Amino acid sequence: MQLHELYSSLAIRNDHKILLLVIDGLGGMSDPGHGYKTELEYAKHPNLDLLASQGTTGMLTPVLPGITPGSGPAHLALFGLDPVAFNIGRGVLEALGIGLVPAPADVLARGNFCTVDSANAITDRRAGRIATDVCEQRLALLREIRVPNAEIELHAVKDHRFVLRLKGPDLDGDIENTDPGAVGAKPKPAKALTPRAENTANLVNAFVTQALDRLKSQPPANALVLRGFSMLPQIPSLQELYGLRSAALALYPMYKGLARVVRMDILDCGRSLPDQLLALESHWHQYDYFFVHYKYTDSCGEDGDFLSKAKHIEELDRSLDRMIRLNPAVLAVTGDHSTPACLKSHSWHPVPLLLSSPNCRRDGSTAFTEAVCARGALGNIQSKYLMGILLAHALRLAKFGA
Amino acid sequence: MQLHELYSSLAIRNDHKILLLVIDGLGGMSDPGHGYKTELEYAKHPNLDLLASQGTTGMLTPVLPGITPGSGPAHLALFGLDPVAFNIGRGVLEALGIGLVPAPADVLARGNFCTVDSANAITDRRAGRIATDVCEQRLALLREIRVPNAEIELHAVKDHRFVLRLKGPDLDGDIENTDPGAVGAKPKPAKALTPRAENTANLVNAFVTQALDRLKSQPPANALVLRGFSMLPQIPSLQELYGLRSAALALYPMYKGLARVVRMDILDCGRSLPDQLLALESHWHQYDYFFVHYKYTDSCGEDGDFLSKAKHIEELDRSLDRMIRLNPAVLAVTGDHSTPACLKSHSWHPVPLLLSSPNCRRDGSTAFTEAVCARGALGNIQSKYLMGILLAHALRLAKFGA
């Protein structure tokens, strides 16, 4: 039995509400430029500290120790799914990132325009980073291509990047990248990794052959490569699993898309944190579970901007009051992963977690920082267990065994 | 390989004794009525604190984060078994609770007398909570019933509750409840969930048909429902797995029964903690592993009586001296699960653990409380790992690999 099935088998319904605040890329690293503090340790966040002192803390390991997760696995784990069993392919994730939600039968791939020489060897894997509108023009050419018994959709992402979506009967995403991954190599034909995927690989090759024909006279974008062929994993909704009417309050398409994967309702929440809070307040009575996503901490971490990341934590802290005033049965604050400014990227470091609930055991935490949470009573647990902990504190799990 | 098989493959014998003291329902929750302390934090227990300061502490998660265990899974985990893989059904547990130990081939079910109306719909799921002696009279009527090739035993539990034990060849417990679980619904026929269980379901239905015939003129107990059909899981003994001659010192039938499941010797230990201590002392040289069970903390927690639970912790603390004087190679003190008085029920909160042994690494713990143990060096581990830790500290596990 998988973990979410075990939790699901114990789920009971009541009217206790769960609010999960995900501060993207929350965790940091000891920064030598800032007294070896993390962004969270450097920032002032009296509301988070107060919550921690009245609650219980711990650390979340997004996937497994040492593993740096992408946004997909990091969020699926927070939603209670094993991120290794339910891995989301690059093609599907790229689609979600531009607001496209694949149907379960679709095959998705991430596409790159590239430059090849007369011997068909790649000379530039990004086709000189053509502008997005040039990408759009090239895709317009390719949209005229037809393949038998299937439909091909092409969506520009940014620069040389696009999404290919294949719709039709009996498709399968178990196909090797056509991207050889290196300059000097030639694009490869799509190759089925299982017999079930052979039909799909043939369709992809039929498309690519015609596409190359249309592109060949148009350098620098005179070829294309595809990778991350994948299908949407079949994931039960939070409603089916736990009887939770769930809603996502996220500003960016990627996170709306990830919430759609577990079939949350996606609430329209404008363009800023105050808009998100308004939407949260006005939909409070309609749902049981709220996923509030705060993006800027991650972006600042990726930019290597320690001080901005700290400032955004402080901004969020000032908004916490409004979430607390809604009086959720369980309020959890954590991140999907760490994004230390000094690494300028996602990292493997565990993520601080704070849980506030009348049903929690206060553990003497004095603040919401990595150092305090690492000694918190929840211990260091994998993110996929968070859902069970949230349900338990909302008294939504029956006893296991007699 | 399952965990207990791994530990078993490394087990070596020596004469180092292990004493496991299980304080039932030990863990608490921050109680607003008592300064946000838990019962263990409120109680005075200098002996436990001293042991902690000379030992190492940690937290046990009985099953998985967020999961509230019943007594069955909670104890099997402490005995080193994966409580999800070896779940004990309600029928078997009910039997153990009245001192009945099923044979491996038996099928057990929990029975309730109930009241039905003229349309056979349930009007009272507990038959007006008939007294136990009335239950006993009704069972006497039903004991005359015969079914082909099998024997039916009926045992009164309390009030309207009884245990049905089916003995015979080729029985299987994979049968749906006949209890519809709601007033207004009709009792259902027993339905096999697998082809192997069809014969057993037929026997159950043959019994129920005759039983209803005998009960129909006897309201309020004019019908019955059965649930939790189950068989004893096949579990190797601690002797077979680890070469441990093991003994249980428990006062209540349920815990004696659970110890019997892993085939401990059940020592006669009177009716009180002093009796248990006497029995422990007098059998000290005969066994390698002792399971001492202390019930009252759980009962007080279930009753919502914070102060009584704290008092019983203090009572136990005063008796600790006698266990220490036996000088076990390893003395572990923990609970099977938490039973916070303010929840009046078992809960999912991790359980404090204290380990005292010449072979332990002192971790600077200053007391035996949830807050201290949450920061202890053993970390927060699943209860099923405790057996390996006990064996290790008793130098009873050989090196793994070369």
Image (tube, coloured by chain):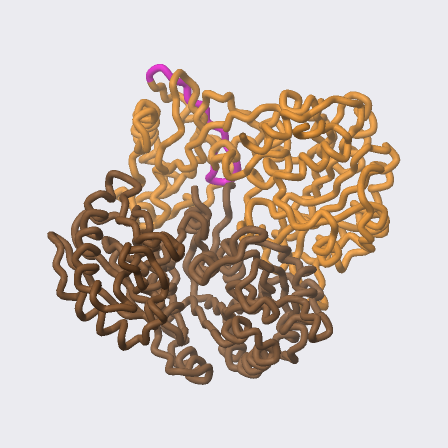
Chain colours: A brown, B orange
Residue B235 in the figure: left or right of residue B224 = right
Return the x and y of residue A66 as percentages of the image width and height.
Answer: 58, 53
Return the x and y of residue A159 as percentages of the image width and height.
Answer: 34, 72
Residue drawn at the location 19% of the way across and 60% of the way down: A211
Q: Is residue A378 visible?
A: yes
Residue B21 in the figure: left or right of residue A130 = right
Q: Is residue B320 magenta?
A: no
For the N terminus of chain A, which image quadrant?
Answer: top left
Q: Which quarter of the picture shows residue B221?
A: top left
The range drawn in magenta is B148-162
Residue drawn at the location 49% of the way across and 68% of the way down: A20
Does B398 sit above or below residue A211? above
Return the x and y of residue A2 as percentages of the image width and height.
Answer: 43, 45
- The image shows a total of numbered marks equal to 0
Residue drawn at the location 72% of the way across and 58% of the way down: B371
Residue A206 in the figure: left or right of residue B211 = left
Q: Which quarter of the picture shows residue A36?
A: bottom right
Return the x and y of residue B38 as percentages of the image width and height.
Answer: 70, 59
Q: Is residue A230 visible?
A: no
Q: Is residue A80 or residue B105 the one in the foreground? A: A80
Q: Is residue B191 or residue A114 the one in the foreground? A: A114
Q: Which quarter of the picture shows residue A236?
A: bottom left
Does A304 sit above or below residue A224? below
Q: Is residue B157 magenta?
A: yes
Residue drawn at the location 50% of the way across and 40% of the way down: B159
* SS assignment for the magenta stretch, majority: strand
Does B100 sit above or below residue A115? above
